[in-house]
Image (cartoon, rainbow, N blue to C red):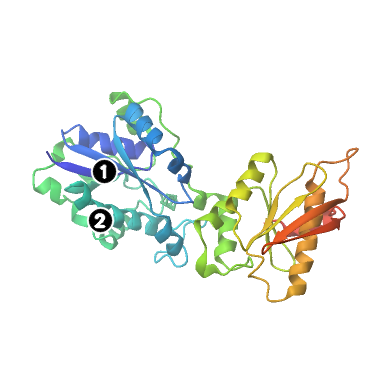
Amino acid sequence: MTKALALFSGGLDSILAARVVAAQGIEVLAVKFVTPFFHYDLLADVAGYRREVREKYGLEVVVEDISEGYLELLHHPRHGFGRHFNPCIDCKIMMLQRAKEMMAEVGASFLVTGEVLGQRPMSQRRDTLNVIGRDSGSRSILLRPLSAKLLPETDPEQQGLVDRSRLLDFSGRGRSRQIALAGEFGIRDFPSPAGGCILADPILSRRLERLYGGQLALPIADITVADVRLLLVGRQFVLPGGGWLVVGRVEAENDRLLGLAAADDAVLRIQERPGPIAIIRRAARCYPDPAALTADLDLAASLVARYARKIDGRPRAGEIIITLAGSERHVAAAPAVDEDFAGWML
Ligand code: SF4
């Protein structure tokens, strides 16, 4: 039986593309790529996700973590960024390259994507689709079933593995034909088109741009998955000495911060009343000047006091415990004044 490997974002187009091919009696395996920028939480319950996709869309899916190469890609995407910090063209090229490598492992003869000609201004223009096919080395084996009739024939069509006459000619931004087709497949519950990728989020992508731009006291050559995860938690600040401070807002975030804290981070907490966990990332390594480190730690302590439980409706001073490089020190901190730190927010 012919087998195809389908890139699966989870959006309607990717669902339909896989189902259109499967409707020809071809076995389709969907692959869902994850990175800390999109869909990373799926890794916590891969079996549950596979079950959900099977039940909702009738598709078998595997989850592939491509974080490592992706962290690297963001330093210099060859085709640049979209409106935000989203390197969509290189992102698709990378996924296709990885999918192409997987073909032999899973016994697939060709690749499938849900791209629709002209649907997105940058990444789905005809010339861009060509570039994606060319630079991923998959042009001849890459079938885009939703727009296939508007595109040159691919190998699987020429070889008779796929019946071109049963493929589609969707183009443009409208969604009505997709929604009608979903109805024919009995698919009613599908996610909205946008969403899920923080690289295209106006606010979070700005934070990432600063991280990758070297604006936080952190060597950009070794940005880790945990760094990106950390960037999405709680209140974020860049302190005057350059330190990257993250402050939990609720207990769940405090737990998350403790889970993401590394040995070279400074961890701060308040002694006598409920309050946030705060960490200064890589504090033990990233301050060439010890005085700047001390000043940032003191400011961080004042922010912990500010965000700790108020007394009589007002922020109060408190004793803050700072753990750094295996040693612990206690400082008495007055609460920071909001106007003073407004400019430090990331
Ligand atoms: S929106 Fe995000 S996941 Fe989608 S192609 Fe662009 S960078 Fe990749």
Q: CA distance from mark 2 to mark 1?
A: 24 Å
Question: Image quadrant of residue 310?
Answer: top right
Q: Is residue 16 above or below residue 225?
A: above
Q: In what element is the residue under mark 2?
A: helix
Q: Position of residue 290 (x, y in %)?
A: 74, 74
Q: Label 2, on which residue?
A: 101
Left or right of 25: which side holds 170? right
Given the current orientation, which residue lies at the most extreme left position? 159
Give the quarter of the image for residue 188. top left
Query: Which callout, 2 or 1, points at the residue further toward the start of the chain?
Result: 2
Residue at 11% across / 42% down in the picture? 161
Callout 2, which amino acid? Answer: Glu
Q: Nearer the viewer, residue 101 or 324?
A: 324
Residue 329, above or below 17: below
Residue drawn at x 45%, y 67% as measured from the top left = 76
The quadrant of the rendering that contains the N terminus is top left
The disc label shown at residue 295, or none: none
* Residue 218 locus on image (x, y percent): 60, 67
Q: Which residue is mark 1?
A: 147
Q: Nearer the viewer, mark 2 or mark 1?
A: 2
Please state the horizontal and vertical placement of residue 300, each as a whole percent of the image. 76, 58
Q: Residues within 10 Å of mark 2 (few under 14, many from 20)?
A: few
